[in-house]
Amino acid sequence: MRNTMHLAAQYLATAAISFTEKKADDSHTNLGWTNHNLVTHPFPNRDKLGLSYENFSLEWIAQNGNKEHFLLDGKTHKDIINWISLTSINNGITKPYSYNLHYEIPNYTIEDSYQFQLAQQNELSQLIKNRDLALDVISNVLQSSSYKSPIRIWPHHFDTGAFFNINENLSIGIGMATPDTLINDFYFYISGYRGHDSVDIINPASHKNYYSDSWKGFALSIKNLNKEAAIDFCKTAINVYKKSMK
């Protein structure tokens, strides 16, 4: 279901690309996580498009809070494109909807006949827990030190992340990534930057969970990881970067 939801999230991304003003950093495509829904930024008419993990459905969310649901189970790619196009028109959006991504997702192809299926409801429940954990942990880390950053989900890599400045020489990326070549599980990550360049930490070999090959930063699988331990991991990693910049 993880890959299925990643595919489904691209309808939100393409709606944002179609209806909202493009931003240089691509942030117009990123998504919020609210009440177990992925949600776009507001469209010009202040409506949003959501993806409900609980209902396995797309939701057109009007500015007054009313919702139109479109259940995904059994629906084809073409069905979904037609629904978004018609619903956007019916809600006063004049720009046409186009399913056109400007980035590539590895091993990702979809045709008009592709059919979505709700294979494992229990997997969706676990994905909800993962997203909730990510939001809780990142929010705690930001609030405890008065760091300022939105927490967003990026539809390309599908990670939940935030990015904030500690000072003029150090910025921190924090988030939860989906399984990839670094760790074959959901994992928290912390990475330090000076401008666009990665920051080298002092004596990296002495730090557990630090990676420095294809990517530099701290990463830890969420397997058997509770909220408190995740928060401690993130804060400890941030402190390592702060000490390295002194």
Image (cartoon, rainbow, N blue to C red):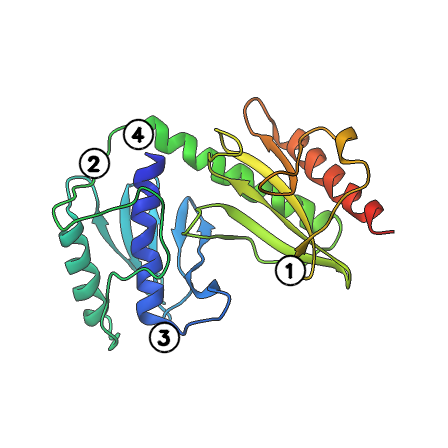
For discs 3 and 2, the disc positioned in front in the rendered view: 2
Badge 4 is on which residue?
121
Badge 1 is on which residue?
196
Q: Residue 17 at what x, y percent from top left?
A: 35, 66
Residue 94 seen in render: yes
Badge 2 is on which residue?
117
Q: Residue 57 at what x, y percent from top left?
A: 26, 46
- Give the residue at x 32% y 53%: 10
Q: Earlier in the sequence, mark 3 or mark 4?
A: 3
Indicate the amino acid at tag 4. Answer: Gln
Q: Residue 230 at what x, y percent from top left?
A: 64, 33
- Give the residue at x 56% y 29%: 222
Indicate the amino acid at tag 3. Answer: Pro
- Give the residue at x 62% y 58%: 149
The alpha-carbon separation of the residues under discs 4 and 1 comes to 40 Å
Contact? badges 3 and 4 (CB < 8 Å)? no
The alpha-carbon separation of the residues under discs 3 and 2 comes to 32 Å
Residue 64 seen in render: no
Q: Residues within 10 Å of mark 2 (few under 14, many from 20)?
A: some
Instruction: Determine which of the numbered discs, if any, sits on residue 44 in the image.
Output: 3
Q: Residues within 10 Å of mark 3 (few under 14, many from 20)?
A: some
Looking at the picture, does residue 51 appear above or below residue 102? Answer: above
